[in-house]
Amino acid sequence: MKSLLHFSTIMFLSIIVISCSNDNEAGVIPSNSIVLSASLNGTNEVPANTSTAKGTAYLIYSKTTKVFTIKINYSGLAPTMALIHKETVNNENPIVFTVGKYFDYENPTNALPLIDFTSPHLTTEQETELLTNQYYINLYSSAFPDGEIRGQLINSNLDGSGNKNLY
């Protein structure tokens, strides 16, 4: 499973290299940026469910602008909502960001299998929570209204310099 996550991270970074374009070098993760990733499935739900749906998420956070962009790919479900929650000890798990708001709610099978979201500026507290792996992504569906697939956002130890992040 760990090698699948590493492979997925490499594939995502390859896609960035191919598809990015701006005044900087195309495809380079901006300096002072951090990559987080998540593997989403039903067994990560609390309690676990029997869904065969799956997904991957990649988040690039800029420590300079305090903004992140996240892309979530999924298959095997028609999501009705996509949220980022904060994991808490008492399991209240408040919603931090609503990232999936572009679904065709009248016909959810028309939804594209990609969620693309850019955050507002994070507070210092939100930045700390994000960078210490306290957030998870949850995709909901009519079949699993309490959450169909879920994945913890984990720091992938990459930054714009290609070095491991040292906190």
Image (cartoon, grey):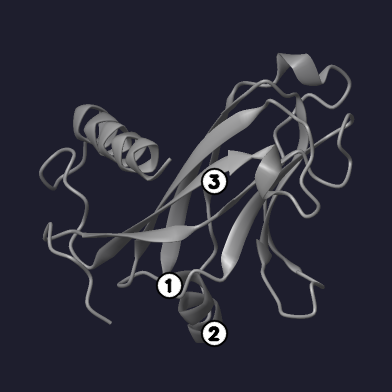
Q: Earlier in the sequence, mark 1 or mark 3?
A: 3
Q: Position of residue 52 (x, y in %)?
A: 69, 25
Report how far apart the C-alphas of labels 2 and 3 lie in the structure: 20 Å
* Camera-nearest label, 2 or 3: 2
Can you tell which quarter of the image residue 106 is in?
Answer: top right
Q: Nearer the viewer, residue 37 or 98?
A: 37
Amino acid under label 1?
Leu
- Position of residue 7 relative to residue 92, above or below, is above
- Residue holding disc 1: 131
Query: Mark 1 and mark 3: span between their CA atoms?
Result: 18 Å
Residue at x 85%, y 27% (from the top left corner): 105
Residue at the image position 22 percent from the left and 32 percent from the top: 14
- The secondary element bearing badge 1 is classed as helix
Residue type highlighted by circle 2: Glu
Q: How would you rate the neighbour count of disc 3 (Cα within 10 Å): few for under 14, some for 14-19, many for 20 or more?
A: some
**4, above or below 59, in the image:** above
> Quick one: label 2 or label 1, which is nearer the N terminus?
2
Q: Is residue 77 left or right of residue 33?
A: right
Where does label 2 land, which residue? 125
> Which residue is drawn at the image coordinates 50% and 37% (left, top)?
56
Which residue is denoted by mark 3 in the rendering?
117
Q: Quadrant of the C terminus?
A: bottom left
Q: Amino acid at mark 3?
A: Phe
| Residue 72 visible somewhere in the drawing | no
